[in-house]
Structures are given as structure tokens and as C-alpha cells.
Image: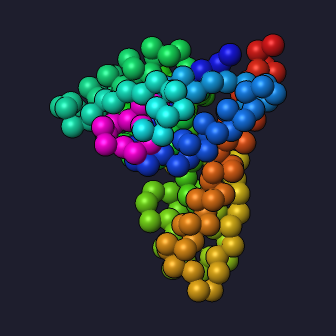
């Protein structure tokens, strides 16, 4: 069984969706992996409590305790590596990772972004889509590279932008799609890598 390590910084709603998918598909074998650990850079992250209720090991690596990004990423990598992950999943992990960390997990580090990349990388994606007059917005699951929000796209889902949308209402509908898309994209990635190694 392959291991997944999920990195979070907050409430962990995407992490929870992935955990539910892994548990739901455990007996069918469709997911093909177990969530080995959930790691946060913030001790107060609500997602840690959710992970514990599912019996998942948790860890905290507080970024403020490290003098540099490199030092933090090295400490984070040691915690991640202890679980021998086939895949490292960023689920609301609000830290820009150093090139060294990204390269360490090249090809097995994924992220979810609330826009249809390559449109609107970075922050404030929903308001930017509304301001640009977009008729559709959406969400992208992608591999992480050293260029922010520009890795190879694994999956996308489209969400219509309504005439009366605010950033908050659009964000809510996009998040609902994230919870469906991320577990599915991970399952497809796992199946694809298994077929290449078998």
C-alpha cells in the first residue's frame, strides 16, 4: 500500500475530502493508498484535529521557529520522509516551498489551485476572475514545480461565474468542486503510476 502525506495550514477541508475518499475506497482498492500522516506548519490548524479523529498520525513543524525557508523545508522534509510517501499532497499549505524541497519530491508533489491555470496564479483568484469579466472560473490540480502555480496540469473542473457573484459566493462553489476533483485526481495519479511501475 502506497503512503500519502498531506500538508496543511488551516481547516483542512480538502484534506478531509481526500481522507474520506481513501476510507471509502479502502475495500475496493480503487484509491490504492493510505493517508500516512498530516503535517502542518501551524499547531492551531483545525485540520489536525480532523486527521486525528480518523486515526491518522499528525505532526507540526512550526515555520516561525526556523531562521530561513531552507531550514524549515529541511525539517519538514525529515518529517515527510519518515513516512516514505509515494505522493506529497499540498492541501491549503500556505507556504512557498524552496526549490530544494520541490526537487526532492519532483514528480510526486501535487497542489490544488482555485482557478483554471494558467489563468490567475497566486492569490485573490475569485475576485480577479470576476474583475476580468470571466464567464467561467474553476479549479486545477497540478504537479508542483519551482515556478509558482505552473506545474503540469493533472485535472481541472469548470465553475460558471454568475452575474451576481461575489468573490465569496464564487469561492464557495469552487471549493465544492475542489472536494470532488482533488481525491479523483489523486486516485488517477496513483493508478497511472502503478500501471507504469507494474
**One can see residue 172 in this view:** yes
Picture residue at 54% right of the left edge, 66% below the top? 171
- Whether 81 is among the magenta residues is no
- Whole-percent x, y for residue 142 in the image: 61, 43
**Horizontal arrangement in the rendering, residue 1 relative to residue 40 (left or right):** right
Residue 65: quarter of image: top left
Total number of numbered labels? 0
- Whole-percent x, y for residue 12 in the image: 48, 45
Picture residue at 32% right of the left edge, 22% below the top? 75
Picture residue at 63% right of the left edge, 86% below the top? 163
Most extreme residue toward the front is: 53
Q: Which coloring applies here?
A: rainbow
**Horizontal arrangement in the rendering, residue 41 relative to residue 26 (left or right):** left
Q: What stretch is highlighted in magenta?
A: 38-48
Q: Is residue 71 above or below residue 172?
A: above
- Whether 40 is among the magenta residues is yes
Q: Which quarter of the image is occupied by the N terminus?
A: top right
Q: Which quarter of the image is occupied by the C terminus?
A: top right
Residue 3 or 123: which is nearer the viewer?
3
**One can see residue 191 in this view:** no
Residue 198 or 172: which is nearer the viewer?
172
Residue 71 or 167: which is nearer the viewer?
167
Most extreme residue toward the bottom is: 164
- Whole-percent x, y for residue 134 in the image: 62, 76
Residue 161: quarter of image: bottom right
- Whole-percent x, y for residue 92 in the image: 46, 47
Q: In this view, does 96 lie above or below 30?
A: below
Picture residue at 21% right of the left edge, 30% below the top? 66
Amino acid at each position: 500500500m502506497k503512503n500519502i502525506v498531506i500538508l496543511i495550514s488551516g481547516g483542512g477541508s480538502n484534506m478531509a475530502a481526500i481522507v474520506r475518499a481513501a476510507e471509502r475506497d479502502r475495500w475496493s482498492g480503487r484509491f490504492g493508498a493510505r493517508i500516512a500522516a498530516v503535517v502542518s506548519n501551524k499547531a492551531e490548524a483545525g485540520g489536525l484535529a480532523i486527521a486525528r479523529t480518523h486515526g491518522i498520525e499528525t505532526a507540526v513543524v512550526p515555520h516561525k521557529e526556523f531562521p530561513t525557508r531552507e531550514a524549515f523545508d529541511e525539517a519538514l522534509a525529515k518529517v515527510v520522509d519518515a513516512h516514505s510517501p509515494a505522493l506529497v499532497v499540498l492541501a491549503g499549505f500556505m507556504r512557498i516551498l524552496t526549490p530544494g524541497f520541490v526537487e526532492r519530491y519532483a514528480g510526486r508533489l501535487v497542489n490544488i489551485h482555485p482557478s483554471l491555470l494558467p489563468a490567475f496564479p497566486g492569490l485573490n483568484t475569485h475576485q480577479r476572475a470576476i474583475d476580468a469579466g470571466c464567464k467561467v472560473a474553476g479549479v486545477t490540480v497540478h504537479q508542483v514545480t519551482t515556478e509558482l502555480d505552473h506545474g503540469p496540469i493533472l485535472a481541472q473542473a469548470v465553475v460558471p461565474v454568475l452575474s451576481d457573484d461575489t468573490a465569496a459566493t464564487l469561492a464557495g462553489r469552487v471549493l465544492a468542486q475542489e472536494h470532488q476533483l482533488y481525491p479523483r485526481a489523486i486516485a488517477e495519479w496513483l493508478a497511472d503510476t502503478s500501471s507504469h511501475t507494474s
